[in-house]
């Protein structure tokens, strides 16, 4: 199993990931339709005004920062949902949160195109509304993980059906919708990025506060309850934090699949299931995966930009399968 | 006379929507420092009784008392500081090491982000030693055998430093070697530390060998209670389990049952 069991090896792995992330970020800033050469990049980092200072400050850097925040948020959302719902397939996508956000955004884009400014708000509202629906259906069953998951799948199906009706009826206005549905990190201002980050901070703080409880919640419900932990309360709070992080992020960047589902698994395969270690590694891998995916998406067939979610699914799926195969073979990192 | 550390008096429990009582007027007492076994056919209410006694389920009627206080007056954390539960099987296998799981036994004693104390460490190391897991502390739980995994859950419960430990069919998936090792460990703890043990067992000969008293349940009611050798007679076995049996004496002067 790819399990790094000693603290020293974990630190080495973390250092390796940080170096890799740094390299990807530098590449991401340098590459694009207007390349920034090493000398110019060093000058820019030194605070000098160069020919591409505007591209650096207003286009590349915001995009890189947004890719980091997006990766962190979606990966954490998936990890939290998978932990408290005890299901490896739980993520904002399968739970209907992404579908709710997409539906909210699509309603505005197709029915109220003049109100484009409220798209993030509508997406956030749609995601949270989907979660509230799931809670309503699961409440009487004491928020049992399997009921939450099934309610999520059902809500997902219904909302996706509504989405299909909308896109069929307004098929002539779909260009913006398709772009949003595939995830788009381009053209975001520092203000928008600051908004995502500011809204994310309360969820980050909550995760830090509840870090010690996450391991207990990975046990079965009876075992956790016998340790004096109010399982339903923590399940609700932590799932809400995950959904909130996903909704805040999807509201700004659209739908980006794969990250919430696969990144926590990659992190688990690397360092095991202790959340005190797993959470930091999920953050690192999430940031790395999205920044890497976005760099590839906008450079591989430049000047055309591919949807970042598509790139990550194409590259991340096989990588995950590779890790799984290594696990079966019993090899160690 | 041995004082009962835990009592359940006139307990009634019914699952929502069910017509039958899962427990009907069940009264039990667990003497301090003794091993009390619960036996009975499948569906007789043994696990339901254990959940009521640990406080994870609330009886419809009746009172569970720990020491002198009703358990219902205690918070979940307070209960977990005195009473531990070892389940039959854990469906979710956590991707944690042995030590990481056993450390979770200190949860009832720790506030959010409270520092790990020497007392916490002592309790964990002691639980690992007693269960023979000290050498496996760094191993992944999923890499252990079934017997070792069951010992991990026992160690977690012992890390709670409980006065009472309940075990729900802890020997079900173990081979005979691990079954006896587990019961011997419990017996040692009971004798050396005064641990009070409540255990559901299917093997009546293990009850005869290890338990101090036994409650026999059938259809949610206690049909017999007392010292195992007095309770587990062939007539009762025939009436409750529908199996013919004979009592023999082992060379160690234990009563044992032969079924046929």
Image (tube, coloured by chain):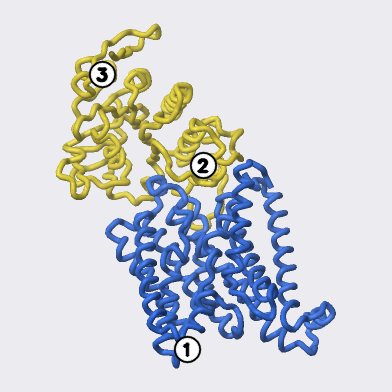
Identified at 37% across, 54% down, the residue is: A146
Nearer-N-terminus badge (2/3) = 2
- Secondary structure found at label 3: loop
Q: How far apart are marks 2 and 3 (CA)?
A: 36 Å
- Does residue A270 appear in this view? no
- Residue B182 picture location, percent across and down: 45, 27
| Front in this rendered view, residue A197 or B166 | A197
Q: Nearer the viewer, mark 1 or mark 3?
A: 1
Name the quadrant of the N terminus of chain B: top left
The answer to whether marks 1 and 3 mark residues whose Cβ atoms lie closer than 8 Å is no
Task: Please give the residue where the numbered disc 2 appears in the rendered image.
Answer: B102
**Drawing shade for chain A:** blue
Q: Spatial distance from mark 1 to mark 3, Cα to Cα?
A: 78 Å
In the picture of the structure, the residue carrying the numbered disc 1 is A116
Taking the image as shown, residue A48 lies to the left or right of residue B223, namely: right
Front residue (pair B200, B141): B141
Badge 1 density bin: few <14, some 14–19, many ≥20, Cα 10 Å: some
Chain ID of residue with mark 3: B
What color does chain B have in the rendering?
A: yellow
Determine which residue is flagged by label 3.
Answer: B232
Q: Is mark 1 on a helix, strand or loop?
A: helix
Q: Distance between the residues labelled 2 and 1?
A: 53 Å
Q: Look at 26% across and 45% down and name the residue there.
A: B70
> Is label 1 on the same chain as label 3?
no
Q: Residue shown at 33%/68% (left/top)? A: A133
The disc numbered 1 marks a residue on which chain? A
Q: Helix, strand or loop at disc 2?
A: helix
Residue A186 as seen in the image, left or right of residue B213: right
Residue B223 image offset from top left, x and y in percent: 18, 27
Please indicate whether residue B58 sits to the left or right of residue B192 in the image.
Answer: left
Are discs 2 and 3 located on one and the same chain? yes
């Amino acid at each position: 199993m790819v399990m790094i069991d000693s603290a020293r090896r974990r630190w080495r792995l973390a250092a390796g990931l940080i170096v890799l992330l740094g390299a990807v970020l530098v590449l991401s800033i340098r590459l694009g339709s207007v390349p920034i050469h090493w000398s110019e990049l060093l000058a820019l980092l030194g605070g000098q005004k160069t020919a591409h200072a505007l591209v650096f400050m207003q286009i590349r850097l915001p995009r890189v920062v947004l890719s980091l925040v997006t990766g962190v948020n979606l990966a954490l959302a998936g990890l939290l949902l998978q932990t408290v719902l005890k299901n490896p397939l739980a993520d904002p996508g399968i739970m209907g949160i992404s579908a709710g956000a997409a539906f909210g955004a699509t309603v505005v884009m197709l029915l109220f195109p003049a109100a484009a400014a409220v798209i993030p708000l509508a997406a956030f509202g749609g995601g949270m509304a989907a979660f509230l629906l799931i809670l309503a259906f699961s409440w009487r069953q004491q928020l049992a993980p399997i009921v939450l998951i099934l309610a999520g799948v059902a809500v997902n199906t219904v909302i996706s059906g509504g989405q299909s009706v909308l896109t069929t009826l307004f098929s002539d206005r779909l260009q913006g919708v398709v772009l949003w549905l595939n995830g788009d990190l381009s053209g975001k201002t520092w203000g928008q990025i600051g908004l995502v980050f500011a809204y994310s901070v309360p969820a980050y703080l909550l995760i830090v506060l509840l870090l010690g409880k996450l391991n207990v919640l990975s046990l079965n419900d009876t075992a956790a309850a016998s340790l004096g932990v109010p399982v339903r309360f923590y399940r609700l709070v932590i799932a809400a934090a995950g959904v909130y992080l996903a909704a805040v992020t999807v509201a700004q960047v659209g739908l980006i699949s794969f990250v919430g589902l696969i990144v926590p698994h990659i992190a688990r395969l690397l360092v095991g299931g202790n959340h005190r270690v797993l959470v930091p590694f999920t953050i690192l891998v999430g940031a790395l995966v999205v920044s890497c995916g976005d760099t590839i998406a906008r450079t591989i067939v430049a000047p055309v930009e591919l949807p970042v979610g598509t790139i990550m699914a194409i590259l991340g799926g096989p990588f995950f399968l590779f890790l799984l195969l290594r696990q079966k073979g019993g090899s160690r990192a | 006379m041995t004082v009962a550390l835990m009592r359940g008096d006139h307990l009634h429990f019914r699952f929502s929507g069910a017509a039958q009582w899962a427990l009907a007027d069940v009264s039990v007492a667990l003497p301090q420092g003794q091993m009390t076994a619960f036996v009975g056919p499948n569906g007789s209410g043994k696990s339901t009784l254990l959940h009521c006694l640990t406080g994870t389920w609330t009886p419809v009627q009746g009172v569970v008392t720990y020491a002198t206080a009703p358990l219902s007056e205690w918070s979940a954390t307070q209960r977990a500081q005195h009473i531990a539960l070892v389940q039959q099987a854990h469906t979710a296998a956590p991707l944690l090491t042995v030590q990481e799981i056993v450390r979770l036994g200190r949860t009832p004693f720790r506030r959010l982000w409270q520092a790990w104390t020497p007392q916490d460490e002592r309790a964990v190391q002691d639980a690992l030693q007693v269960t023979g897991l000290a050498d496996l502390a760094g191993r992944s739980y999923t890499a252990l055998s079934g017997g070792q995994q069951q010992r991990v859950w026992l160690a977690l419960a012992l890390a709670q430093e409980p006065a009472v430990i309940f075990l729900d069919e802890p020997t079900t998936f173990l081979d005979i070697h691990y079954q006896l090792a587990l019961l011997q460990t419990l017996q040692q703890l009971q004798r050396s530390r005064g641990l009070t043990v409540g255990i559901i067992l299917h093997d009546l000969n293990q009850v005869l060998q290890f338990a101090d008293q036994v409650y026999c349940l059938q259809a949610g009611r206690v049909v017999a209670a007392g010292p195992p050798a007095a309770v587990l007679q062939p007539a009762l076995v025939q009436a409750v389990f529908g199996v013919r049996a004979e009592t023999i004496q082992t060379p160690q002067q234990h009563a044992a049952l032969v079924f046929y």
